[in-house]
Image (tube, grey):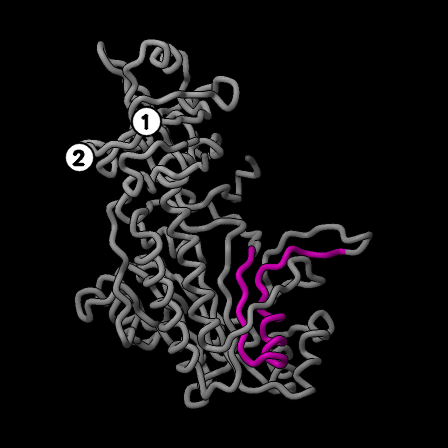
């Protein structure tokens, strides 16, 4: 008999089926016992009345892996309106050692640190696994949208010979006796691949050796990177980002609707045109001094509230960041050279995306590095490619974990990360 998932039970009313999963909970009443089985599809209620089977169920511990064979009957009070009766129960392994918290409760009562210490079992809780399902759907939507627009997925090295951006904090390692670093970004490589495919994207890990200890930063996270050629300026990049976000959100709503329901959240609306303000205007809206060189978290929150109030949008573009706060490869605004053709996208008052137009002329790279007192040699393999003809181009990068955290309302990005790596955590 072929195994089915709990989510498939409604289609098998009256049939004998085989389920397999984990003992989620047992409820032992005087005349009947209930075994709640958890599998990849959800929960199934198993009704036990036979004394021998009841004795088996009483001996089981939560999280023990079992197989159940029984008959599916309708019951509006049971999960999905069905339950399994007259079962046989067969353990598929030894009795499990129960985790240090109750997975059957609606909310994990353990603190986040305890959950992360015991991540392999904490992630089994529906609230934790729901966030990961949303993450998977978001990546699927990201890929599908860009595939539909003629982009090519690429895979670039995660061990590099120099930092991606001047002054970056990177993780050093030994590469057969030579110094090397974990890649802070695929930035250089995705630009070079524009010279091959014109439109490229990558889904992969990036590493930031910055000693942040906040609820929004990780030392390793998943970056959704995009780069496209033959742009007029950064606004072409912003248009692609808007469509990409819309595709991600639509796929989450379609493929992870159950996960959204578990967490009690709804997918945000991505307006046909996301509102945009120049950096100088953003400072005024946020009540920041006009000499402020960057936006602080409090400024971002104020801008998020403004965008929702004035435009009904969870998203807001802030364009024209000062060149002094952008990497050397950023294209300046031709009309205002102190400002960039770059942007950030805020999602509910938190920076989610950084992007913009890049330099594409070899001479401009030499001048940009010289202006910052940077030698060319560490970047020679990258800069040299621009001698051979590169189109005007630009791109962006979305932090996946931060996207999911903002969408679900998680207070800490670690709540939506399977095995987070940060200033303090290298295990499990």
Residue picked out by circle 2: 76
The one nearer the camera, 296 or 57, is: 57
Task: Write the start and end of the magenta stretch as one range.
Answer: 179-205
**Split into 4 quadrants, where in the image is the C terminus?**
top right
Residue 46 lies left or right of residue 344; in this view the side is left
Give residue 403's quadrant in the image. Answer: bottom left
Give residue 288's quadrant in the image. Answer: bottom left
Percent x, y of residue 374:
65, 73
The 10 Å Cα crowd at callout 2, few under 14, some 14 to 19, many 20 or more, is few
Any part of residue 165 in sight: no
The one nearer the camera, 102 or 417, is: 102
Percent x, y of residue 180:
72, 57
Percent x, y of residue 346:
34, 64
Which residue is pictured at 64% across the width and 58% down the height?
158
Residue picked out by circle 1: 36
Mark 1 near mark 2, Cβ–Cβ under 8 Å? no
């Amino acid at each position: 008999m072929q195994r089915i998932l709990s989510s498939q039970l409604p289609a098998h009313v009256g049939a004998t089926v085989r389920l397999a999963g984990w003992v989620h909970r047992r409820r032992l009443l005087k005349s009947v016992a209930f075994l709640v089985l958890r599998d990849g599809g959800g929960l199934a209620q198993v009704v036990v009345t036979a004394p021998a089977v009841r004795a088996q169920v009483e001996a089981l511990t939560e999280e023990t892996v079992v197989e159940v064979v029984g008959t599916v009957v309708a019951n509006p009070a049971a999960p999905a309106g069905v339950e399994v009766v007259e079962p046989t129960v067969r353990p598929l392994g030894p009795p499990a050692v129960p985790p240090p918290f109750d997975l059957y409760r609606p909310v994990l009562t353990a603190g986040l640190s305890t959950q992360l210490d015991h991540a392999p079992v904490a992630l089994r809780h529906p609230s934790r696994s729901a966030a990961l399902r949303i993450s998977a759907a978001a990546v699927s939507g990201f890929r599908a949208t860009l595939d539909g627009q003629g982009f090519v997925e690429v895979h670039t090295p995660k061990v590099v010979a120099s930092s991606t951006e001047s002054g970056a904090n990177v993780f050093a390692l030994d590469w057969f006796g030579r110094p090397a670093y974990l890649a802070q970004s695929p930035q250089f490589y995705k630009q070079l691949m524009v010279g091959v495919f014109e439109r490229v994207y990558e889904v992969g890990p990036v590493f930031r050796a910055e000693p942040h200890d906040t609820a929004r930063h990780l030392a390793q996270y998943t970056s959704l990177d995009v780069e496209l050629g033959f742009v007029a300026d950064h606004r072409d990049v912003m248009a692609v980002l808007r469509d990409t976000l819309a595709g991600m959100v639509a796929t989450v709503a379609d493929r992870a609707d159950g996960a959204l329901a578990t967490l009690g959240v709804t997918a945000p609306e991505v307006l046909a045109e996301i509102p945009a303000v120049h950096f100088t205007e953003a400072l005024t809206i946020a009540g920041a001094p006009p000499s402020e060189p960057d936006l602080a978290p409090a400024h971002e929150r104020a801008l998020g509230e403004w965008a929702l109030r004035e435009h009904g949008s969870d998203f807001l573009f802030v364009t024209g960041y000062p060149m002094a706060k952008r990497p050397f490869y950023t294209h300046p605004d031709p009309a205002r050279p102190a400002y960039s053709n770059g942007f950030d996208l805020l999602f509910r008052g938190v920076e989610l995306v950084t992007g913009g137009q890049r330099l594409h002329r070899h001479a401009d790279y030499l001048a940009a590095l010289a202006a910052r007192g940077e030698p060319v040699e560490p970047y020679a393999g990258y800069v040299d490619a621009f001698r051979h003809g590169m189109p005007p181009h630009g791109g962006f990068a979305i932090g996946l974990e931060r996207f999911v955290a903002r969408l679900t309302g998680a207070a800490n990005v670690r709540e939506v990360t399977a095995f987070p790596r940060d200033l303090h955590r290298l295990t499990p």
